Amino acid sequence: MNWRRRPTMEDVAKAAGVSKATVSRVLAGIEGGWTPATAEKVRRAAIELGYVVNSLAASLRSRQSFTIGLVVADVSNPFFGGIASGVESRLSQTGYSVILGNSGNSLEREKALVKVLVEKQIDGLITATSAAAADHLREAQDRGVRVVLVDSEVPGLDADSVTIDNRAMAEMAVRHLLELGHRRIAIVTGPMEATFDRQRLAGYAQALAAQGLAFDEQLVLRGDLLAHGGEQAADRFLRLQDRPTAIFATNNMMTLGVLVALTRAGIQVPGEVSLVGFDDQEWYPVCHPPLTAIANPACELGHAAADRLLTRLTAKGDGAQPQAERLVLPARLVLRASTAAGPTSGIGQVPAMHLA
């Protein structure tokens, strides 16, 4: 049998152009004797070669656990599964293990999970939070845990974040509906605790304002970020006296709930109402009709968050940490068959837009 030779520390040293001792110190997290730039070269070389750190030996040398905590808002949501997959695939290449925690969209549960993970002496924490609270994450930082936020931001917290431009993407989704001639557009949002909820609502309002349309609070249908909340929001939509001709649902689970409620009520999409979703999923193209949606790059967000955390961990021997950074990844609007011309189409008021 032809087995592929496992890469060695010597291979990493040769690829990075440094000594074996430097590779050992960087990957073990031993402070001193290297710069952040050198550490990055070593880490990249290790990833590209598929070199796996002997984490037990490294932890004994460096007093690191080589364990990362990952807290997501809803483990049943495929979007967060994509983030977790991206985080784990990147970190496992460098010898780190990942402990996954599910907050269930509960701030109290999130706080409890972070406390437990810190007590387990994790080296870093990646959190995809649906809240905007900072105290428990700041306490983790005070205990020496590096924190990276993914998919959301927490005001007042000095930590790296990896997101998309939620405001711009929501504006693009609503602008698409406006371009089709829709003027009464409902939005299904979360409970407005997470920054992405607020930013998506702001993008919705901005798109309307750009066309001189008033923001109508009755058309803001708040859900719970779950499919059940999307169903309840759609039920409220169906009871509106002057029913909107389009719906923008701001996450994938609520998009599913909206679609279920409309189907149950016998409402045809897009014949009676156009629908734009968020967090494009594998099942969106096989729906009847296939769903137009914002594609939110979950796996890439996870990859980028893991990379940011690894950079922080390898830079700790260089004294002061670099300033926190906000990394914004590209997203796009995927046009399918769930949107069609509205009742005022053809009036030519909305210029054609450029899709990302």
Image (tube, helix red, strand yellow):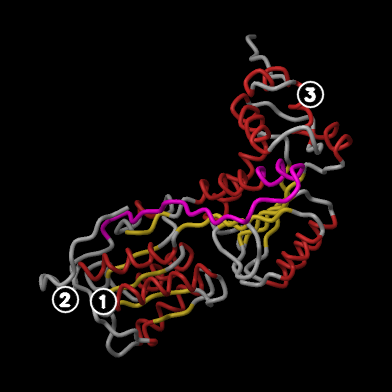
User: In the rendered structure, which segment of residues is drawn in magenta?
Assistant: 310-337
**Which element is circle 1 on?**
loop
**Compared with residue 34, is residue 351 higher up or lower down, i.e. above or below?**
below
Q: CA distance from mark 2 to mark 1?
A: 8 Å
Measuring 36% from the left and 59% from the top, which residue is drawn there? 293
Q: Which residue is mark 2?
A: 343
**Which element is circle 2 on?**
loop
Foreground: 166 or 25? 25
Q: Amino acid at mark 2?
A: Pro
Q: Which is in the foreground here, disc 2 or disc 3?
A: 3
Q: Which residue is mark 3?
A: 21
Q: Amino acid at mark 1?
A: Thr
User: Between disc 2 and disc 3, whose residue precedes?
Assistant: 3
Foreground: 38 or 219? 38
The dot on residue 245 is: 1
Which x, y percent locates residue 184?
27, 80
**C-beta proximity under 8 Å, tags 2 and 1:** yes
Measuring 40% from the left and 69% from the top, which residue is drawn there? 249
Q: CA distance from mark 3 to mark 1?
A: 66 Å
What is the quadrant of residue 272 in the picture?
A: bottom left
Left or right relative to 182: residue 32: right
Q: Residues within 10 Å of mark 1 (few under 14, many from 20)?
A: many
Q: Is residue 116 magenta?
A: no
